[in-house]
Image (spheres, rainbow, N blue to C red):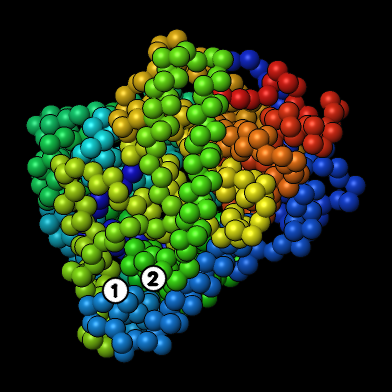
Amino acid sequence: MGRLKKTRIVACALAFSIFMSQVTYVKATEVPVNTSNKVVSDDLRLQDDFYSVTNKNWLNTAKIAEGKVSNSTFEEVGKRLTEQKKEIIKELLANEKNYSKDSDEKKIINLYKNMLNTEARNKQGIEPIKDMLNKIKNIKTLADITTLSKEDIGNPIVNIGCNVDFKDATRYAAYIYPTGLSLGDSDEYVKPKENTQKNKGLTENYYKKLLTLVGYTPEQAKEKVDNLFKFEYMIAPSIKGQEESSKNPNAIDEIYNVYTLDKLDDLAPNLKISTLMKDSKLDNANKIILTDPKWLKALNEIYTEENLPLIKDYIEINNIAGVAGLLGDDFQQAAKEFSNGFLGTKGELPKEEKAINAVNGLLAMPFGKIYSEKYFSNKTKENVQNITDEVIKTYEKRINNLDWMSEETKKRAIDKLNKIGVQIGCPEKWDDYSKLEIRSYEEGGSLWENMENIGEFFKEKQISKLNERIDQTEFNCPPQTLNAFYNPTKNTITVPAGILQKGFYDENASKERNLGAIGAIIGHEISHAFDNNGAKFDADGNLNSWWTEEDYKKFEEKTNKVRNFYNNVKFDNGKNVNGDTTVGENIADIGGIACALDILDKMPNANYKEFFESNATVWREINTKEYNELRLQRDEHSPNKVRANVVLAQFDKFYETYGIKENDKMYIKPEDRLQIW
């Protein structure tokens, strides 16, 4: 979901992020996993660990680059993407004189140069944020906080945004989201994990460093950070955590709570939500959706003059952290130290690569237009469209053959399937950035000015959508994105140009290899239309049940079987996958492979080994220990090794192809194997 914060906090937080970059019991399944670059033994059999044997040579030689948390097929393709982006920048710089002042190309060049100009940022020091700091320091009452929005200073205590109306997917509505937390998930505060204290300590040290860099003494910095965490520990219990949400089958339904401005002020009179909405230019919303009433009520009780010092320090630290990526080298060094401790990275990315990543993120669509013209072909689009059409047709047959679903629900499922919009590669029309000014330092501009202008540009763009009709043709992501998506409110899958290259798609590869990679990924995204969350949205993208009551009960039983199975997938270090958090992605993984295998079954002399090995290659990866731990706790996807071994072991054809028997470690009893779609 998109969120809307005020100008500075939007642009600067984005820049900083770029710089930092209930059923049957199932027997526990042992899935050995590499927590470091561990050598794969020559004695290991693929019948015991298909993923490791298939990827043995790569796993035995792969290294994690400086500034990175992992190496993988995604990272390798990402490196190729980076080289392509570098080539674009090189060509733009070589032809700079040919571009007009207001052209997208000139904006990209100016932003890139300003990102690289650390000398200018070092010279400015904290001058760009002094006005912001002074205004926060001058806060004397809660009423002063309410007026911060007028000053374009972020107030992360209440996050207000514009998003698609879940129950009227033709329109945009205003949304109110809970307070942001430094440790991310409220469970870290209420149900601390084994590494919570370590991560909290790293965060505290980082915040203290930032505060001393802006002029506070170590003692003052410690007091402010203590105040921030006092406030966060007070509000965290009222915010739904990942564990509660992932186990709640009605989690999506429960975030849809329609309120008027008067009702919001009645619920939280201390917060003056109507004033915040007005200052955010969202008070004319036809519909306001409060995602968590329990949180807002609790926040109102905490939001008192007595707690003003805590609230004030929380706001100040969040604003400083949000802009740190735009300041000088001392701030960059603090960010690097935090990243190294938190994610286990070593070293840092080259400045040029960080600058390219920043431009690619902040001017994503103008950059994407140039990328698409240079690197994406009509032939690739046509080929991938044909693969997608075949996957959808195969999916329809699979739905018709389901033995647990009634004809009434099947008809609605197929209607939803056939209404899925398909976006491949890049948009057919592009956004207009002519009103966005990006000046170089030589032209009297600065990186700080660039960020303010970008923040204002996107804020106004988002506000302009409020109450308006949804543009169904709007591309769901920048074309140079290395990923693929399903959008439930649009009922659309997006396969951007960035993922359509070797590693995932190769026009010279066999059909089997492409099906094992991009074919399975496309099937995965389509399966999201029918996972535990997607299944709640109808063919038109509305949060609206299209199931018979009996069929939905059967679906929940099958979903819970997936939950239980993955909850018992155990690593050799004794830690389990979180089957509740990952259930939607696991359903999609299994659905994608099932559909791709059906296509192979229709091919004469299909090479199943090529298919299975291609899929295992897609998921190869090594991570830092810290990143492995973080993903296991937070990621909605299972670890990549599980996405290969556990998913492929659900299918009879995998057993036939490799002669897997009951005593092999890859073996799963037929009655325990998972299938929904």
Q: In the rendered structure, which disc, 2 or 1, sits on the residue that comes first in sequence? A: 1
The quarter of the displayed image where residue 577 is located: top right
Residue at the disc numbered 1: 104
Residue 292 image point, x, y percent: 29, 32
Q: Amino acid at mark 2?
A: Ile
Q: Could you tell me which residue is drawn at 61 percent across and 25 percent down?
A: 675
- To which quarter of the image does residue 140 belong? bottom left
Residue type of the residue flagged with mark 1: Asp
Q: Are marks 2 and 1 in contact (CB under 8 Å)?
A: yes
Which secondary structure, mark 2? Answer: helix
Task: Check disc 1 and report its element: helix, strand or loop.
Answer: helix
In depth, the one of 313 and 120 nearer the eye is 120
Residue pointed to by mark 2: 370
Q: Quadrant of residue 421?
A: top left
Q: Quadrant of the N terminus?
A: top left
Q: Residue at x 49, y 36 (%)?
A: 392
Q: Position of residue 334 (x, y in %)?
A: 46, 68
Q: CA distance from mark 2 to mark 1?
A: 9 Å
